[in-house]
Amino acid sequence: MDALTGPVLVVWLSFHAVGVLAFAISGALLAVEKRMDLVGIAGLAVVTATGGGMARDVLIGATPVAALTDWWMLAVALGGAAVVFLLHRWMRRLDKAVLVFDAIGLGVFVVAGASKAMQLGVGPVGAAFAGMLTGIGGGVLRDALANDIPAVFRRDSRLYLLPALLGSSAAAAAIALGAGHWLLIMGIAALVTTLRIASELLGWRLPSVRTEAIPTVGG
């Protein structure tokens, strides 16, 4: 992706911050649902907001990872945790707003992740995987730490991993073909966001196998 400067950089960072905040809120809300204390709420918020990016940076050798050098990410994530801790009784009413913010964050994270991987010499296929991981990794870690099946793997979940993979693949392909202008990359992020929101509103999901629970031996 072409270097971002001036107002464009401000807009990009603003969208990134919105995504970090939304992911942090989703992690903090799950912590409240699981009856965790303040430390658990803050921890799950930070992991959800930054886990995907940290996993990506470790895989592509971009160390120290961005979440540890860009202090504002941790600050925004902890701010989201504080908001949920203080206002969790009212936060459930804002589920649609959180969905929109989360979708924006997903779109920005997947294209940013793919772009960063390409800049560090990773091939298009690897960059597409890195971008997808940036978008979904935090949520997977959140659910695992809360002892849940990750939402992206549940058969009743709406489209999440697929938009992330499509967006990261499109961004990686565009950059590899020399068409990684920031306007196109942001357009791809917008399409990911739109597909994610549409899947929730229209109930889109991937096909799954309907099975009955298998009883344990001796149960």
Image: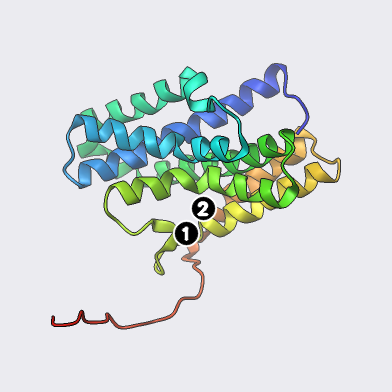
Q: Give the amino acid type for the residue marked by disc 2 in the picture.
A: Ile
Residue 168 x %, y %: 65, 48
> Which residue is most to the left?
219
Q: Is residue 215 above or below residue 69?
A: below
Residue situated in front as seen by the camera: 157 or 150: 150
Report the residue marked by disc 2: 197
Disc 2 packing (10 Å; few <14; some 14–19; many ≥20): many
Amino acid, disc 1 = Leu
What residue appears at the point 16 percent right and 43 percent down from the top-left corner?
35
Near-viewer residue (128 or 85): 128
Rendering coords of residue 88 (x, y %): 23, 36
Q: Name the image quarter holding the N terminus.
A: top right
- Judge whether 206 appears above or below 123 on screen: below
Left or right for 78, reference 159: left
Q: Secondary structure at mark 1?
A: helix
| Residue contact between numbered discs 1 and 2, judged by CB atoms under 8 Å | yes
Q: Residue at x 78, y 29 (%)?
A: 2
Q: Residue 201, labelled with which disc?
A: 1
User: Which quarter shows the C terminus?
Assistant: bottom left
Q: Identify the image quadrant of residue 150.
A: bottom left
Where disc 2 sits, the SS reads helix
In the rendered image, residue 3, in percent from the top left (x then y), is placed at 75, 25
Sort mark 1 into few (<14), some (14-19) or many (20+) by Cα contacts within 10 Å: few
Whole-number angstrom distance, CA of label 1 to CA of label 2: 6 Å
